[in-house]
Amino acid sequence: MQEQKKPAKFSTRSIIQLTHSIRFRLVVWFVLILGAVMVIFSAFIYWRQAQDLRSAAVLRLNVALEHALGGQGEAEHFAEGGLLIFQGLQGSNPASDTNIQEGTVLALQTVDGSILDSAGVLSVVQLQQIHFPAAGWSGVQQVRVPKSVAEVNNRYLFLNRAIAQNGQTTGYLLVGVPLDTDNQLNRLLVSLSSGIILTMGIALVGGLWLADRAMRPVKTITQTAREIGETDLNKRLRMAGQDELSELGNTFDAMLDRLQAAFERQKQFTADASHELRTPLTIIELETSRMLAGHRSLDEYERVLRTINSENKFMIRLVTNLLTLARMDAGQTNIKAEPADLSELASEVVERLEPLAKSGGVSLGLGDLPEVKVRGDRALLAQMLTNLVENAIKYSANAEVPQVMVTVGSRTEDQRPVAWVQVKDNGIGIASEHLTHLFDRFYQVDAARTREGGWEDGVNAPESSGTGLGLAIAQWIAEAHQGEIHVQSAIGKGSTFEVRLPAMG
């Protein structure tokens, strides 16, 4: 026999989670607001119905009074044993007369307040047990007939009319109609209450269903977020639609795209940095092991020490550049905003790097240098120009007549003044397929080229040469100053790097 599955039961934890969920709170607030609106609306309906019933009773009073007076508008006198207006109403069931509507009461009250005669459903004896106001009261008066008096509707509205004889008031004609509002209002109250409870119940169930459907995309986002691991950022929501939740899903996908791109860059960055550091460490380890294996000549020791010194300088440059990029990425670089003359900066950089260029056989010169001012950090701008010039020197060292030229100028683009610096070389050039990756970290156009470019011993190599980080740092500095770097290059003809920055007006 197959084991029967026990019906699922709501656990205390699931109930607590449900009551603390957003959808439950939304539904509760919705039902409470709907209930409050319905209660207010029902109270208005109840009050309006009560007013309409009372108005109808007052209208019946006036109609009954007119019938009682026979359309003459007033009572003239008493007759012995009763009012003349009661004539023709005597009988076993006077209330059935067409002049008296069903349930109507007519009574004759003397000036001292006693009941002299009556017609209708209440007798004189019954009327005498009703507490009426003092004689001469006016308007509409609501009275209650004790149930011990008669099994009739115990709420009546009475209207009185003075009866004059020889110009003097000799009594009052009382006309009463039943105020049968309790039963009608009670039935209305039950109907309205039942409607409110039923509507709120339906709203609660329907609201939970609608909230569950509306919150499904949120569940999908939560589930996807839980399934994403540290090394797996490929999952996406791909939500269609134009509503707010779809926009949230698309924003979530865009965030995952950025995270994945950053994660891939981090992995590549770590792998490249490890590779770059492994090479000099391996060289140092091999050279020192070889030297320790036996006695060597003084020249051999000197060569190995030069090699170790070169590799050590390379690692220092690499670590320094890595720390610089890390501070830049973390936003820890303090950028000063001060006026700076690009021509002056270009002259200083060329003057400082001229010995380095000469040691590599490169002619480093200056072109036009008009006064062009920008607002920025002089030290960072100088580092940007230094990296660009060093890169140009590095890849021009093996040219037939190696030459690097630095030029400064300004122009107007899109009605805005733009300052520019060009660093032009006649080196080996860059193929078009490499241009899009030129500013990526650790990217090397020619993997076969030595890290020191034209410096075989590496002693006089530029500070940023070989690490693959100089152009990345230069681009970050340019972008931090709301600028950009453009590159034009042709194989065998050299390259031109142009930095464009907002010029001071």
Image (cartoon, helix red, strand yellow):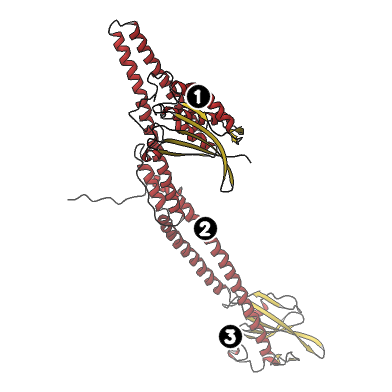
Secondary structure of the residue carrying numbered label 3: loop
Q: Earlier in the sequence, mark 1 or mark 2?
A: 2
For residue 398, the mark is none
Q: Residues within 10 Å of mark 1 (few under 14, many from 20)?
A: some
Q: Residue at x 35, y 12 (%)?
A: 304
CA–CA distance in space, label 3 to label 2: 45 Å
Q: Residue at x 35, y 45 (%)?
A: 235
Secondary structure of the residue carrying numbered label 1: helix
Foreground of the two, 120 or 150: 120
CA–CA distance in space, label 3 to label 1: 121 Å
Q: Residues within 10 Å of mark 3 (few under 14, many from 20)?
A: some
Foreground of the two, 438 or 53: 438
Q: What amino acid is labelled 2 in the image?
A: Leu
Locate the C terminus and report the quarter of the image it occupies: top right
Q: Residues within 10 Å of mark 2 (few under 14, many from 20)?
A: some
For residue 32, the mark is 2
Q: What amino acid is labelled 1 in the image?
A: Leu
CA–CA distance in space, label 1 to label 2: 78 Å
| Circle 3 or circle 1, nearest the eye | 1
Look at the image and tell me whether residue 272 can be seen: yes
Q: Are marks 3 and 2 in contact (CB under 8 Å)?
A: no
Residue furthest to the right in view is 167
Identify the residue under disc 1: 353
Residue furthest to the bottom in view is 88
